[in-house]
Image (cartoon, rainbow, N blue to C red):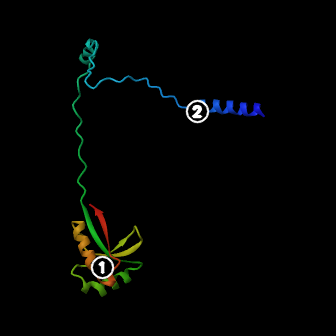
Amino acid sequence: MNRIILLSALVLLLFLSACSTVNTTNSTKTPDNEVYVFDDASDLEEELEEETPVEEPVVVKSAPEVKTTFIVQVGAFSTKGRAERFKQENSSKLSYELKISYSSKVGLFVVQLPEFETRTEAESVRNKLWKDKVFSDAFILAREK
C-alpha cells in the first residue's frame, strides 16, 4: 500500500513539474534615454548611391462621381392594370405625380414618386405618406446614376 502511495506521489510530482511554466526572456531592456549609433554606415551610403533613379509617378484618373437619388415607392403590382387603378384612385391625395414602371428585379409594376436629391427629402415625404393608410407601406429606394 505504501508503495502505491509513494509511486502515485512520484507520478504526481513529475506531472506537476512537467506542466509548470518557465519564464525565460532573451531580450535585454535598455533605458529610455539610451541612443543606438550605427557602427559603420559607409556600406549604406554606397548602396544609396547605386540606386536607380525614381521613375515618374503614374497618374491615376479618379472614378467618375456617382450621384445617388432617392425614390419613394408606394406600391407594387403584378399587372399594369392594377398599378394604373391604384394610381387613378390615389393621385388626388398627393401633390406629386405618380409614375408606373416595370421592375425586372422584382418582376412587378411599381408605382413611385419622382426622384429626390437627398435622403432627408425622401424621408420627409415618406413619413407624411405613412399617415394615410393607403401609403403605409411606402419605402425609399436609393438609385445611383
Counting from the top left corner in percent of width and height, residue 115 is at 24, 70
Using a 10 Å C-alpha cutoff, classify the residue at mark 2 as few (fewer than 14 neighbours), some (14 to 19) or many (20 or more).
few
Name the secondary structure under disc 2: helix
Q: Residue at x 25, y 85 (%)?
A: 93
Counting from the top left corner in percent of width and height, residue 120 is at 23, 68
Q: Residue at x 68, y 30 (%)?
A: 10
Q: The N terminus lies in which quarter of the figure?
A: top right
Mark whose residue sits in front, 1 or 2: 2
Type of amino acid under label 1? Trp
Counting from the top left corner in percent of width and height, residue 40 is at 28, 12
In this picture, is 63 found above or below 39?
below
Type of amino acid under label 2? Cys
Tell me the tag on residue 130: 1
Q: Are marks 1 and 2 in contact (CB under 8 Å)?
A: no
Q: Residue at x 23, y 54 (%)?
A: 65
- Whole-angstrom CA distance, mark 1 to mark 2, is 68 Å
Which is more N-terminal, label 2 or label 1?
A: 2
| Residue that label 2 marks | 19
In this picture, is 36 found above or below 12?
above
Q: Residue at x 24, y 82 (%)?
A: 94
